[in-house]
Image (cartoon, rainbow, N blue to C red):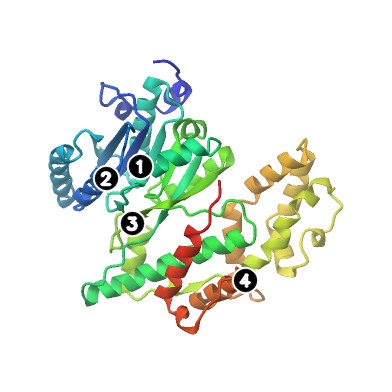
Amino acid sequence: MTEDFANSYFKKYGNAFTQFPQQFFPLDLIVVIPCFNEPDIGKTIHSLAQCEANSLRVACVVVVNSSEASPPEVIEQNEKTMAELTAAGAMLENKIKLFVIHAEKLPVKHAGVGWARKIGMDWAVSQFRYSGNRNGVIVSLDADTIVEENYLTTIWSYFQQHTKSAAATIAFEHRIETNDSNDQFVSGAIVWYELYMRYYRNALRYVGFPASFYTVGSCFAVRADAYVAQGGMNRRQAGEDFYFLHKIATFGGVGEINSTTVFPSGRISDRVPFGTGPVIKKFIEGDRSYCYSFALKSFLVLNPFFMRVADFYSINSDVPVSFFSANNLFQEFLMANDLTTQIVELASNCGSCEIFTKRFFHLFNAFIVLKWLNFAADHPDGYPREYLPDSCSKLLALMGVSLTENLHEPKLMLNLFRQVDKDYSIH
């Protein structure tokens, strides 16, 4: 062991899983896959087997997990998965080392995708720790995804070129199947959900919010040292990706990898409380909430506020709320949440405008943005939710993207947003 960059982390968070296996290997990149009641893991492993690896030293660790309360059918499927993974090792040949962690009967309180992902990521850190490779890359994937052949090499190349990036999101497109009438109904739900995600993210990016990135559990990668520095993955049973990426954004920034694509499955699922699977299930049951979005006006109110952050550094406690925004509704929100007082206090405790600006967006973070959007949507004098395609067309027009009438159809509009995202890059 040459450099113990994770010693303090494992003193606090070490567990039995980080000791598996006892044999360690010098590695560059480790793919982590949580797996619960998953019949399609073979497709994902086969997809990885087709990837170019060149001289990269790559491993994949699959965390087959269950809770103390998991029903017999889940345990049975997990046993089948364990057997399938044993056979799958040969498929990967010498290109990728495959490891399987059987994390069974986890306490119900924390059992779920967050803990399973944490187990795998912590294990990855233990491997990098052995060889002192603080710049090793941990890649988060899911057991229902397919990747492109350049997946591994593109991720590695990104982190080699962008040495200051702590993490990066990876381009994604949910698989849209249309083999029969039921598939078409499910596909419709996927289209609406992904279109909602892309509208939300692009609206945030348009108004200048710095943390405007996607938070999809199967579509991000992080450096080992950054993972350790911000305290590792959380154990949330859903939304673990959202909390993790927004936390790590405060450490070293989150970039984008748009030259390779992950293809998550779009299917009905009750594995987690929210996310793609539950949204599709609710859509089929009649829930159409994702056909409506926060009004574009509620996003646009934020733009002049974000553009003037540097001006807030020199303020004092006597400044009126109108100094922060000319919008009466936003003024009400700032006052109701004591944000003006917090901004003034923050400014007085920062030694430079640069430090203040960085900490300002720790204060006015993604959670506060979402709180504002809900406030504006629910307020009697606010901005009611709008039909999603209408909001999308208005946003695309502001972004300079020309629309023809037929592009207001959700699937065509989704394809347009996908292309817009791939043509955009941040470091």
Label 4, on which residue?
398
Which element type, helix, strand or loop, lies under badge 4? helix
In-image side of 48 versus 393 (left or right): left
In-image side of 198 versus 186 (left or right): right
Mark 1 neighbour class, 10 Å CA radius: few under 14, some 14 to 19, many 20 or more: many
Label 2, on which residue?
48
Marks 2 and 1, the one that precedes in the sequence:
2
What residue do we see at 38% from left, 60% from top?
173
Task: Please name the amino acid that badge 2 sits on.
Answer: Leu
Task: Please name the amino acid that badge 4 sits on.
Answer: Leu
Q: Is residue 228 above or below residue 379?
A: above
Residue 382 spot, x, y in % from top left: 65, 73
Q: CA distance from mark 1 to mark 3?
A: 14 Å
Label 3, on which residue?
263
Which element type, helix, strand or loop, lies under badge 1? helix
Q: Residue furthest front?
A: 54
Nearer to the camera, 405 or 34: 405
Q: Which quadrant: the C terminus?
A: top right
What residue do we see at 74% from left, 63% from top?
331
Label 1, on which residue?
152
> Mark 2 near mark 1, Cβ–Cβ under 8 Å?
yes
Residue 152 spot, x, y in % from top left: 35, 42
Mark 2 neighbour class, 10 Å CA radius: few under 14, some 14 to 19, many 20 or more: many
